[in-house]
Image (cartoon, rainbow, N blue to C red):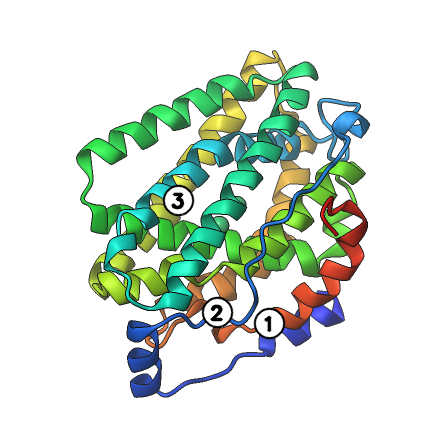
Amino acid sequence: MPANAKLATTDFKTLSTTEALSESSRQSRSQLEIKPRRVSFDFNDIAEPFYYRGNPLISAMWATMSASFPAGEAEFINSVKLFESQINDSKLKQEVKNFAAQEAHHSLQHRQVNKLLDERGYNTAKVDQRFKEKMAERALKWSAERRLARTVVAEHVTAIMAHFALTHSESMSHFPDSFRRLFQWHAIEEIEHKSVAFDVYQHCVNDQALLRREFRYFSYLEFPFNVSMGTRFLLKQMGRKASWQDRKGLWRYLFGEDGLISSVKPLYMSFLDKDFHPWNLDDSVLVEEWKETLAPYFRDH
Ligand SMILES: [Fe+2]
Ligand SMILES: [Fe+2]
């Protein structure tokens, strides 16, 4: 693990139970300005369908993730907005607006890269359609509280993956430049707004049992199922079967030293800590550094 990752993952601020509960149930605990930025990337450098080290499994896995963002992020916005009228903390109210603006722009950029991926042979449009149907069904059948709880969990996942993207340069170096920059910009903003859904949940719902149930369901069933089904579907449509070598590459990518899952697991599981709050992991310095690096890609800089 790179040195800066070690620093960041050990930089936990521990709050007492009383302090954490009273603070988090009352108001926003954001530590960074939530700033929606316009960006511009030229995705034409994604020249090959299997753009990540020639590995079809890793490439299709990230194509699936990217395909899921437009429907997923729309649901994040909608589920938080269901509670907007109940928020009486003005800072948190403003953060909900900025969070929604950031998520909407993420989807716009992912739609563009998804279009390019489809030109390279994927069918992300079909995966996107399937996610849209799932989200529409959820909106009809689930309570507002459950939808928000699920968003809190998904935002935790994106925040720790964002932390990985900004601390694991070797792993990120194998993406084509534009795709890597897209993920890094997305990561900055995911970290900036990582506590918004959580703070709204604490403010308006504060049912910890429901939150833990959704965490387990999402972590052990829905997320791995959706990603593996999407990956299989995309490769099948392309008539590509994964070889033993491809599988080994994916395993190393996920579970090897500095692998995605091996690296994020402790942070991921911290969600179940009694005093969990997204900002117990203070990665604000990391974000400040990356804002400098990515500034040339910000259109309104
Ligand atoms: Fe996002
Ligand atoms: Fe987000």
- Lower position in the chain sequence, tag 2 or tag 3: 2
- Lower position in the chain sequence, tag 1 or tag 3: 1
- Marks 1/2: CA distance? 18 Å
For the residue pair 179 and 55, the one nearer the viewer reads as: 179
For the residue pair 227 and 44, the one nearer the viewer reads as: 44
Report which quarter residue 92 is drawn in.
bottom left
Q: Is residue 73 left or right of residue 179?
A: left
Residue that label 2 marks = 30
Residue 81 x/y as whole percent? 32, 48
Secondary structure found at label 2? loop
Residue 247 x/y as whole percent? 62, 34
Three-letter amino acid code at the position of disc 1: Thr
Residue 258 appears in the figure = no
Residue 91 x/y as whole percent? 42, 67
Residue at image coords 48%, 75% = 280
- Marks 2/3: CA distance? 17 Å
Label of residue 77 in the image: 3
Tell me, yes or no, whether the two marked residues, 1 and 3, touch with CB atoms within 8 Å: no
Residue 243 appears in the figure = yes
The mark total stands at 3
Label of residue 18 in the image: none
Question: Would you place residue 258 above or below residue 137 in this image?
Answer: below
Residue at image coords 34%, 74% = 24
Report which quarter residue 105 is drawn in.
top right
Residue that label 1 marks = 9
